[in-house]
Amino acid sequence: MDVCAQRALQKLESPVIRYKKRERDGKTIWYFDFRNIRHWPAPMIALNAGVKPKYTDPDLAKQKIEEYFRSCMGPLIDRKGEVVYGDDGKVVYVQVKPYTLTGLSRYMGLFTTNFKDYCSGKYDNPAEDNPENLFSTIFCRARQAVEEYAESRLYDRDGQRGAQYILSAKFDWATHKERLDDKNAEFRRWKEYKELELKYELLDGGEDSDVEIHIVRKTKDD
């Protein structure tokens, strides 16, 4: 019996619970774990819904990410249009292009949606023991580098507004007011639905059709 078969038998001796049952809002929800379930003897590759991932080698992904960040660097040019050299006689390099998720994805030959899939762990190898070699770790760190750059532009007068938009749209940053506005809008939608639902119930019970229903939030005095 080969090593792979022995490992498979060892796992069968200690069965793993692959489902969970949850009750939510009066409904029963089942969660199933299909990780590492594959057609034997298929190789241990990332689960990707039948679509072959572009990157299967973590080292290659790391290399391409490093290349992208280096591609955003360029020699420092002074006011005279001349290259600046340091005290050691070497050219001084600075960032000349902004870090962006779209730019990083495009450089790696991916769509931004594919990049998010790597961050989510969709292409992680379940057999990988080193977390540093998981694609979710590699891509999330690259994403954080872009986020760090955008955050640093908040202190830059020229890039502040753009940074605020990117952090809000791409990195789920939001101010307290924005969160409160979203919460209030959600409550209004729920209130309108419940008011209409209650009115229909009253009409079905023979109540006056002119009745008005208004739902209000509970106050401290109530």
Image (spheres, rainbow, N blue to C red):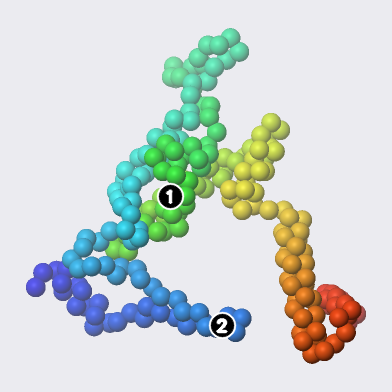
> On the image, which quarter does residue 201 sit in?
bottom right
Q: How many marks?
A: 2
Mark 2 is surrounded, within 10 Å at the Cα level, by few (under 14), some (14 to 19) or many (20 or more) other residues, namely: few
Q: How far across and how far down the image is residue 130, in percent?
A: 33, 58
Foreground disc of the pair 1, 2: 2
Q: Nearer the viewer, residue 123 or 143?
A: 123
- C-alpha separation, residue under disc 1 versus residue under disc 2: 32 Å
Q: How far across and how far down the image is residue 134, in percent?
A: 37, 55
Residue position marked by numbered label 2 in the rendering: 27
Q: How far across and how far down the image is residue 221, in percent?
A: 90, 80
Residue position marked by numbered label 1 in the rendering: 114
Q: How far across and how far down the image is residue 95, in percent?
A: 52, 29
Work out which residue is located at the far left of the displayed protein and give it: 1
For the N terminus, the image quarter is: bottom left
As helix, strand or loop, the secondary structure at mark 1 comes to helix
Work out which residue is located at the far top of the displayed protein and give it: 80
